[in-house]
Structure formats: C-alpha cells, structure tokens
Image: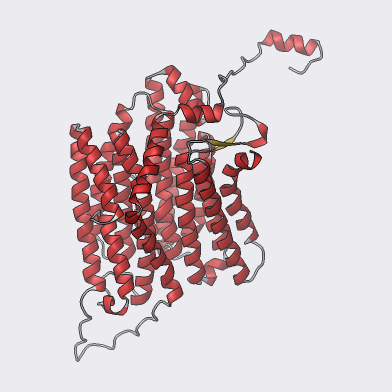
Amino acid sequence: MILQSALPLAPILTPLGLGLLTLLPLRRGPRTALALLGGLLTLVFALLLVRGTAGGEVLVSELGGWRAPFGIVMTADRLSSYMSALSALCGVFALWMMTVHEDRVRERHHSFALTLFLLTGVQLSFLTGDLFNLFVAFEIMLVASYALAVLGSTREQLREGLRYIVMNLTASALLVIACGLAYGVLGTLNYAHLAQRSAELGAQGTVTAVGVLLLLVFAAKGALFPLGFWLPGTYPALPPATGALFAAVLTKVGVYALIRIFTTVFQQDPALPQGLLLGLGALTMFFGALGAVSQREWRRILSFTVMSSVGYLAFGLGLGTPDALRASLAYLAVSMLVTLALFLIAAVAERESGSRLVRPERRGFIEKRPLLAACFLLCALTAAGLPPTGGFVAKYALIRAGLLQGSGLAILAVVSALASSLVTLFAMLGVWRGFFWGKSAAPAPDAPPARPRPAPAPWPQRLPAYAASALVAGLALFAGPLFSHAEATARELRDNARYIRGVLGDDPVVIPAAPTGSEIQKKQESGESP
C-alpha cells in the first residue's frame, strides 16, 4: 500500500535524480549511461502506473502527510498514467538519439541533464493534482526547454528561442492570474475540489470566465491557431534529438491540460469552451496543413504537421461527446508517436543529404536507403490518415463523431479535417518525390565541381528512426486495445465522481472558519496559541 501510494512520485523523482547525477564530472560513457537509465526507469515506473490504474483506481501520493485539498498531492488516474507513459517513451527515444548523435559542445553544457529535467517537468505536469503545481511543473519544464532552445547559440536558435521564451512567459503569467482568479472564485486549486466546488456553484459567469482564461493559456501552450506562431520556427532550429522530443511531447502537455480542466474540473456550462475549441481546432488543422505545403525544409514541414495534429485534438475535445473524447485520446498516441518517428527520420535524411531541404542536390535516396524510405512512407500515410494505418482509424473515429454530433460548427470542422488530411497528404508526397523518388540529375559539362558527398549516417544513428517507425506500425496492429483503453479513460473522465472520491475521500471536505478577533484575543489571554 505504501509503495502504491508513492508510485505517482516515481516518474517525477527518477529523471530529476538521474539528471542531477549527470551533472557530476564524468566521462561521456557513464554520463550517457546514466541519462539512458533515467529515461528507461521513468518509462518503467510510468508503465507501472498504467497497470495500477487499469481498473479505474486513482493513486494518490500525499506530500508531507497533508490530505487533499489542503496539501500537495500527486494523483494518477487512467489519463495521467497514459500521458506519463507516452511522454516517457518519447523521452527514451530522444535520449537514445542524443547518445548516438554525439555533440560534445552541447554535452559539455549539460544537454543530458537538461533533457532529464525537461522530462521531470513533463511528468509533474501530468501527475500533479492541483492547478498551482501545474504552473510549477510548466516552469520546471520550460526553464529546461529555454536552455535547450538556445544551447549552441546559433543566430537562428537565438532568434527563434527568444520568440519561444516571450510567448511562453506571457502564457505563464496568464496562468498565475488564472490561478488567483480560480482561488478567489472557488476557494481551492485542487482539481478534485475544484470539480466539487464548481458543481456546487453551477453555471456561473465568473466560473466560465476562469475556464475561458485557462483555455487561452493552454491553447498558447498547445500551439492552437493563432497562438502557435512560435512553433514552426522553433523546432527546426533545435538539434535533431531535442527537436523530436519538443515536437512529440511539449504541445501535448497543453492538450492534456485542456482535457483535464474541461472534463474533470469544469463540467458545468460547457457550450462556450467547446465552441471555442471547435473553432480554434478547425482553423489550426487547416492552417497547419497549408503551412506544411508552403515549406521546403524537412523539419519546417513537419513542424506545421504538429500544429495540424493539435487542431485535430482540439476538434475532438470541442465536440464534447463520449465518442469524440475516445477518438481524441486514441489520436493522442498516434500524434505523439508519428511525430517522434518523422522527426527522427528527418534527422537521418538531413545527415544523408547534408542539407535541410527536401529537394537536395542529390535525390533518389530510395535506392540508397530503402528501409528509411519505407519508414517515411508508413509515417507519412499515418500522418495524413490513410488506411490501413493507425492514423486512419483515429481520424475516421474523430470525423464520425463530428458527423454524429451534427451541429453547424461541427460539420465545418469535419470539412476542415478532411481538407487538412488531403493537404497533408500532398505535402508528404512532395517530400517523397523530392527526396526519395527519382534520380539525381547529371551535372552539366561546364558546371562547377559538386560539393563533397556528406558522410552517410551510420546504422546506430538510423536505428532510433526505424524503431520509432515500428511503433507507428504497431498503432494499426493494436488499434483495438488502444481504443479500448481510450474508451475506458473517456468514460472515467466524463464521470468524475470516482476521481473526486479517490482524491478527497468519502467524507465531505470541511474548511474551518477563520477565527474572529475576539476569539484570537481570548486565546491570547488564556495563553493558548491563536
């Protein structure tokens, strides 16, 4: 029982502790071993959380022995365990890629430690049980990401890093304001107690206003249009492994917060937030797809597809139906894993061609790297949502839920989703034709000497991309269990009574009244502590 109650702390403390150890003056071998160990242990503990919450249990870890809502608690239910495991898996792949892509300059400035600290903040974001510690988690995560964003100090990194920092600092300031307003209106910041108090107050304008402010904050964190202007330039400026981790995980933290707040906490008066999410989701899907078509560099194209995928998640959450929530939760796994795989494939492709462009001087890489081409084709079809991939299953479920919901805004969002999938497919086919298909043109007789051919990526650098692509293939093979877990999670989120009971217990929360001045004076006269 003690071990079970402490389990929600394990995925947070593990990367933190191993990250601190990597700061010691060690050789590269032991440092990379510690970093990989940190990532793997975090994944193991996250999977134990998934197993521990599979029956609908809510695991609670009370810090300092203070019960919720008065103390800080870490809570794990199906949703938080699911997100913890997915992000830990992405973290393992990012650390693996950092290990095989040696970068001594960044490693000398503690890139492994910063990556583990980033994972600490991500895990805390998923496992915290209250709104203020969500802010603390964001700051831990973002301070590490700020350092990683500018580590290397290239002009592009500093320019895009500044934009990233300013946007996220603004969103964090708004989150602090939202926390203050929520506490002023509801008298608590604990998720379970917030859900209880908002249900007691019912549909009130002040409660709705707090919810809308939180929606804007998390929309900025999740890169919903038009608040995601910082994303397409930031991720391509990062080193390959760091960019893959940022793209796969960071925007999904904002999406998780939206799901948590508007399913577990604010279930009253959902019309306004759902309408906003539907509209923003439709715009984000289409804007991201159009942006991908307009780009000519590997990771800029993929960064816009990340934006588009966040739009699909907002679309599903905005529909507000059980089927839509189930499809959104399933699509979360698809989006995270296919994004991870595509960014790792892009890292190998850029190394092979010596260029960021999808139409480099030398083309026809399908002959040289047929397995890499097959992996890209699988992931491209998954991102576009074509059968028989896991992306098709998840997008079909989202579009079906939108048609069943039937409102005018939902139908417009469905049209945007279908159009965005077609445009994304066109963008992915452009990458295929430009990089993998065809043959390099023969140089003209009077052409200047070609640049030296870049050294090919050795097989250890290609292996993470192949392994991540295998996970993407597994999404189609195991779509049934994925959707079963998503359905159970959606059912649990819509009926938050079990979560509230698991965190607060069966007894009603009684907040004692503050003593009056005369009572304090009597205690002082009698020698008691006031």
Indicate whether 225 appears above or below 374: above
How is the structure coloured here? Answer: secondary structure
Q: Nearer the viewer, residue 151 or 218?
A: 218
Q: Nearer the viewer, residue 505 or 205?
A: 505
x 33%, y 72%: residue: 371
- Quadrant for residue 70, please give it: top right
Indicate whether 359 appears above or below 75: below
Q: Nearer the viewer, residue 314 or 168?
A: 314
Q: Nearer the viewer, residue 305 or 74?
A: 74
x 52%, y 52%: residue: 119
Q: How many marks?
A: 0
Residue 448: give x, y in percent of width and height.
26, 88
Indicate whether 512 appears above or below 159: above
- Quadrant for residue 27, please give it: bottom right
Quadrant location of the N terminus in the rendered image:
top right
x 38%, y 36%: residue: 490
Indicate whether 405 appears above or below 97: above
Residue 530: give x, y in percent of width and height.
73, 17
Residue 107: give x, y in percent of width and height.
55, 67
Residue 338: give x, y in percent of width and height.
35, 57
Q: Does 235 sit left or right of 286 as displayed? A: right
Whether residue 182 is visible to the viewer of this picture, yes or no, is no
x 61%, y 66%: residue: 31
Whether residue 465 is visible to the viewer of this picture, yes or no, is yes
Q: Does 405 sit left or right of 66 as displayed? A: left
Residue at the limit of the structure toward the right, as seen here = 527
